[in-house]
Amino acid sequence: MAIEDGVAGESWSAAEVEVTVLAYLRMLRMQELGQTFVKAEIIRQLASQIPARNMGAIE
């Protein structure tokens, strides 16, 4: 499900910030639990959810 309210070059919407923070908190939790994950894959998935932002902006 894509978040369509973001506009490239403008401030991030609350929904964009929320989904991004949740993804990073998920990665932190996985790291704390010793679980493996591929950050690049999570960033790619996140980029598909917030199309107004490029991967560099997300990371």
Image: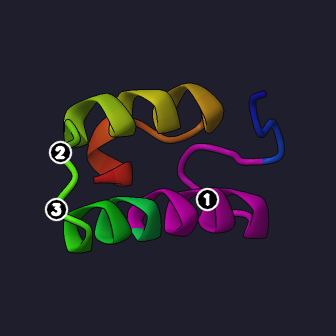
Membership of 16 in magenta stretch: yes
Residue 10: which disc? 1
Q: Secondary structure at mark 2?
A: loop
In the displayed image of the protein, which residue is found farthest to the right?
Answer: 5
Classify residue 42 by image quadrant: top left
Location of residue 36 in the rendering, given as x and y in whole percent from the top left corner: 17, 45
Q: Secondary structure at mark 1?
A: loop
Residue 50: which disc? none
Location of residue 17 in the rendering, given as x and y in whole percent from the top left corner: 61, 67
Amino acid type at mark 3: Gly
User: What residue does disc 3 label?
Assistant: 34
Location of residue 48 in the rendering, given as x and y in whole percent from the top left corner: 55, 25
The residue that appears at 20% across and 36% down in the rendered structure is 38
Q: Which residues are magenta?
A: 6-24
Membership of 3 in magenta stretch: no
Residue 22's place in the image compared with 37, above or below, is below
Q: Around disc 3, counting alpha carbons within 10 Å, would you say few (fewer than 14), some (14 to 19), or many (20 or more)?
A: few
The residue that appears at 56% across and 64% down in the rendered structure is 22
Sequence order check, earlier mark of 1 and 2? 1
Q: Is residue 5 visible?
A: yes
User: What residue does disc 2 label?
Assistant: 36
Classify residue 27 by image quadrant: bottom left
Q: Nearer the viewer, residue 37 or 50?
A: 37
The residue that appears at 50% across and 38% down in the rendered structure is 46
Q: Nearer the viewer, residue 11 or 20?
A: 20
Mark 3–mark 1 CB contact (< 8 Å): no
Q: Is residue 5 left or right of residue 52?
A: right
The residue that appears at 23% across and 74% down in the rendered structure is 32
Location of residue 45 in the rendering, given as x and y in whole percent from the top left corner: 47, 29
Amino acid type at mark 1: Glu
